[in-house]
Image (cartoon, rainbow, N blue to C red):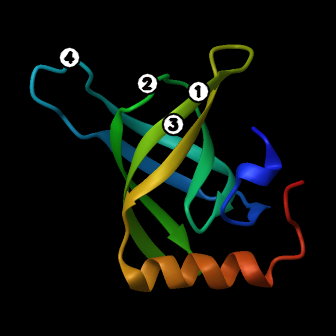
């Protein structure tokens, strides 16, 4: 993706997470699993998992950041297939509390480890 199109600063950050697919009417996609964030921003994150979901799939996440469990609903924006059955999924936040967004913003701003 073109760096100039990004709205938020991204950092490298590893956080374990749990996710589950939010079922949609007539959709046959379902599932739940675990993953590991690779990059985090105020507007979303990139995470690695062993499942792929089509762009537009809504997922609910739980992840621990700074001793707090954060619950976020996000949408798959893009999928990058890696080797050995692993995928990086780009997630855009669709529903996040102001408190949790502020926590993520502070973490990103304090980090010297931004993604170019």
Q: Please, which residue is most extreme toward the left here?
A: 25
Contact? badges 2 and 3 (CB < 8 Å):
no
| Residue occupying image coordinates x 55% and y 83% | 103
What whole-number distance in Å separates the C-alpha atoms at marks 2 and 3?
Answer: 10 Å
User: Which numbered circle lies on residue 79?
Assistant: 1
Question: Callout 3: few (<14), some (14-19), or many (20+) C-alpha neighbours within 10 Å?
Answer: some
Give the x, y percent position of residue 31. Answer: 30, 29
Residue at numbered disc 4: 28
User: What residue is rendered at 82% in x and 77% in y?
Assistant: 111
Seen from the viewer's position, the closer of residues 85 and 28 is: 28
Residue 67, visible in the rendered structure: no
Mark 2 / mark 3, whichever is N-terminal: 2
Mark 1 surroundings within 10 Å by alpha-carbon count, few (fewer than 14), some (14 through 19), many (20 or more) = some
Check whether the beta carbons of the residues at disc 4 and disc 1 lie within 8 A of each other: no
In front here: 71 or 33?
71
Residue 77 image point, x, y percent: 51, 37
Dot 2 falls on a residue whose secondary structure is loop
Residue under numbered circle 2? 53
Between marks 2 and 4, how big is the CA–CA gap? 11 Å
Q: Is residue 37 left or right of residue 2?
A: left
User: What label does residue 77 carry, if any?
Assistant: 3
**Occupied quadrant, residue 62:** bottom left
Secondary structure under badge 1? strand
Of circles 4 and 3, which is in front?
3
Tags 2 and 1 touching, CB below 8 Å: yes
Dot placed on the residue nearer the N-terminal end, 4 or 3: 4
């Amino acid at each position: 993706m073109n760096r100039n199109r990004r709205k938020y600063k991204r950092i490298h950050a590893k956080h374990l997470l749990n996710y589950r697919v939010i079922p949609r009417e007539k959709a046959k996609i379902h599932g739940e699993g675990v993953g590991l964030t690779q990059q985090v921003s105020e507007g979303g994150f990139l995470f690695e998992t062993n499942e792929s979901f089509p762009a537009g799939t809504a997922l609910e996440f739980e992840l621990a950041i700074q001793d707090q469990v954060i619950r976020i609903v996000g949408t798959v924006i893009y999928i990058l297939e890696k080797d050995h059955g692993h995928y990086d999924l780009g997630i855009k936040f669709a529903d996040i509390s102001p408190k949790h967004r502020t926590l993520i913003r502070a973490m990103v701003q304090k980090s010297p480890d931004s993604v170019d």
